[in-house]
């Protein structure tokens, strides 16, 4: 206070009373030497504070401070008394007039007497729930509080972790059982988390159905975070069992130890903890996932690839190319058609194999425009090749996403009409895996194809859940034996036998059979003995661009002599 007259508690008190009516916050002065606390009279209307001035602060505070928070408050005040700190800035809970906990931020500055002893703590109390910093429904603090805490903490050290807890399928819970039920789940989850917390741990509500526990205990990391996740799950499971499973839900946990992260900027920490929780959910929910840099890099790569693919699609499918691989009629040793196989190249990312980009196209829905583009490339190529080889056939792979989520049938029929192609020149290849997921839609799609004269192949037969019932349901023209099955048959007599029986059976129900993956002359000899209808494999040609396909397999209107 320098040269000025020293301010007394009474002076402070009169200032508080002048300012009080014009403020949202509550001003207070704590006379440390006389153990006297004075606070804005308005605070009495809101909180369980007995009087606006009272002695014995430590004893009285138990009347209006939420009991679990009393200890933290007293510890901080202890430091002020001992002159170890002169700034008081903590977030904890007071009890409102109904006895409900309410989050407050109490800030204050210590003034000292002439001997340098702490004299007054002067400051204000701010109800953070009002500014969305705390969530009074679930009892957790909000994200802005977390940000402050993390920014303060990150500068200091590397110990500790963030455990991000998410309620699984919360959207469905809300939709199926109503908002009130959802709120109850949120509140219960918050209570269960809070029950498990120990000193050094704080928790926050981030978005509707996510909570974060911040643990800054020295030496704590992944292991303690996983333990905590399991403990929280245990408490929730107990609560569920206690209620005879009338309430049922699960939680996932994303674990991120600070020691594993280089950049401690708040935004980065939130991003990584979000990634960790999403991984736990993507891996099947009701489990935890520990942040791992390699996984995160893969995630970023995939995201970048999706972005690149999307740009390519928006740029008239630049970077995509349709390759063609010959399909040969084994009895006449004649080229009868080609399978269209998609390729993708990006200047920066290089050549990306279809096994990598097709699932991403499916996931993002981009397979719909790309699939349409491939169909057009195939139909256009087929119509030009037919000028040289009448009856030439082209096969196109369709993803189940195209069948389920787009009007691909009319796209196919329009293209066939537009390019004036005989419908029997186009063969659609479908895999069983897609078929399994959506029986009826696939059956009607296949029926429509056939009604319109388009050919149908059941792809990748012999892998996964091959079931001869599908053959009756889908009624394809051809089944294609996957390369992995061919490879096994070439190595193992039992598999060879099985394949041979499959060929016979297929023929007995009047289906054609195409064997994929024949690479050498020796393999061709062995496979030919089974008497399949068609063969597709590197032996007759690798997939290649249209021009090269013409060059290598079709020339001057003649069918090139096969090897
Ligand atoms: P798929 O439909 O089973 O296609 C046959 C795959 O086997 C092709 O792989 C082909 O290059 C390969 N292959 C054929 N003969 C041989 C051989 O003798 N040896 C070896 N090692 N491989 C052989 P590719 O082109 O990498 O395509 C992989 C998969 O990607 C395809 O498997 C198909 O499921 C998918 N795919 C490719 N293009 C498209 C497309 O336009 N649309 C959709 N939905 N999927 C596509
Ligand atoms: Ca195929
Ligand atoms: Ca295959």
Image (cartoon, helix red, strand yellow):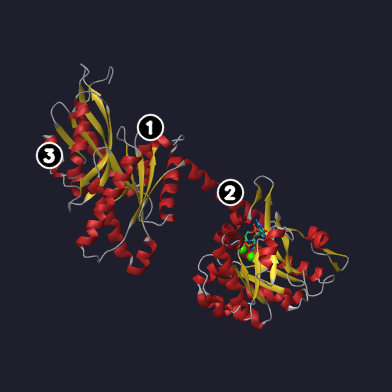
Residue 137 in sight: no
Using the image, determine if residue 69 lies above or below residue 380.
above
- The residue lying furthest to the bottom in this view is 451
Front one among 521 and 223: 521
Q: Earlier in the sequence, mark 1 or mark 2?
A: 1
What residue does disc 3 label?
60
Say if mark 3 contacts mark 2, CB within 8 Å. no
Residue 148, quarter of picture: top left
Any mark on residue 244, and which? none
Q: How many angstroms separate mark 3 from mark 2 (CA)?
A: 59 Å
What residue does disc 2 label?
304
How many marks on residues? 3
Q: Quadrant of ligand 1?
A: bottom right
Q: Position of residue 557 (x, y in %)?
A: 87, 68
Q: Nearer the viewer, mark 3 or mark 2?
A: 2
Residue 313 in sight: yes
Going 37% across and 55% down the picture, which residue do you hit? 208
């Amino acid at each position: 206070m320098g040269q000025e007259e020293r301010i007394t508690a009474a002076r402070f008190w009169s200032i508080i009373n002048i300012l009080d009516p014009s403020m949202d916050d509550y001003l207070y002065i704590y006379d440390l030497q006389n153990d006297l606390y004075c606070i804005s009279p308005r605070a009495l209307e809101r909180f369980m504070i007995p009087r606006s001035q009272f002695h014995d602060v430590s004893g009285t505070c138990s009347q209006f401070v939420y009991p679990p928070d009393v200890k933290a408050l007293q510890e901080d005040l202890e430091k002020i008394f001992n002159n170890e700190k002169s700034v008081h800035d903590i977030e904890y809970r007071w009890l409102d007039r109904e006895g409900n906990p309410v989050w407050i931020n109490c800030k204050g500055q210590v003034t000292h007497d002439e001997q340098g002893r702490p004299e007054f703590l002067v400051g204000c109390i701010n109800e953070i729930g009002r500014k969305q910093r705390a969530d009074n429904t679930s009892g957790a603090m909000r994200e802005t509080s977390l940000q402050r805490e993390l920014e303060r903490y990150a500068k200091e050290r590397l110990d500790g972790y963030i455990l991000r807890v998410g309620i699984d399928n919360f959207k469905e819970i809300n939709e199926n059982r109503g908002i009130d039920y959802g709120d109850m789940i949120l509140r219960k989850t918050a209570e269960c988390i809070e029950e498990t917390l120990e000193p050094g741990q704080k928790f926050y509500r981030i978005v509707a159905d996510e909570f974060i526990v911040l643990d800054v205990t020295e030496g704590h990391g992944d292991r303690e975070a996983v333990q905590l996740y399991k403990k929280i799950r245990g408490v929730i499971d107990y609560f569920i069992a206690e209620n005879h499973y009338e309430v049922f839900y699960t939680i996932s946990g994303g674990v991120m130890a600070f020691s594993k992260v280089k950049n401690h900027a708040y935004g980065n920490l939130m991003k990584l903890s979000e990634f960790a929780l999403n991984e736990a959910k993507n891996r099947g929910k009701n489990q935890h996932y520990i942040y791992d840099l390699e996984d995160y890099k893969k995630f970023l790569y995939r995201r970048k690839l999706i972005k690149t693919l999307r740009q390519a699609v928006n740029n008239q499918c630049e970077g995509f190319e349709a390759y063609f691989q010959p399909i040969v009629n084994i009895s006449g040793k004649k080229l009868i058609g080609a399978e269209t196989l998609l390729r993708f190249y990006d200047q920066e990312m290089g050549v990306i194999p279809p096994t990598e980009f097709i699932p991403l196209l499916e996931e993002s829905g981009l397979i719909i425009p790309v699939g349409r583009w491939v169909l057009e490339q195939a139909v256009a190529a087929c119509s030009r090749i037919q000028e040289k080889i009448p009856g030439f056939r082209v096969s196109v792979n369709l993803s189940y996403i195209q069948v389920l989520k787009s009007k691909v049938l009319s796209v196919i029929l329009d293209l066939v009409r537009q390019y004036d192609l005989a419908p029997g020149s186009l063969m659609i290849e479908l895999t069983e895996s897609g078929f399994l997921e959506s029986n009826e839609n696939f059956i009607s799609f296949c029926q429509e194809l056939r009604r319109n004269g388009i050919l149908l192949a059941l792809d990748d037969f012999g892998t996964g859940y091959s079931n001869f019932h599908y053959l009756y349901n889908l009624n394809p023209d051809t089944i294609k034996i996957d390369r992995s099955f061919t490879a096994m048959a070439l190595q193992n007599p039992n598999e060879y036998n099985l394949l041979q029986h499959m060929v016979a059976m297929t023929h007995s129900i009047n289906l054609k059979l195409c064997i994929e993956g024949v690479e050498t002359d020796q393999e061709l000899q062995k496979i030919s003995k089974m008497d399949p209808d068609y063969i597709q494999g590197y032996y007759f040609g690798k997939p290649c661009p249209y021009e090269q396909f013409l060059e290598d397999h079709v020339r001057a209107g003649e069918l090139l002599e096969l090897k």
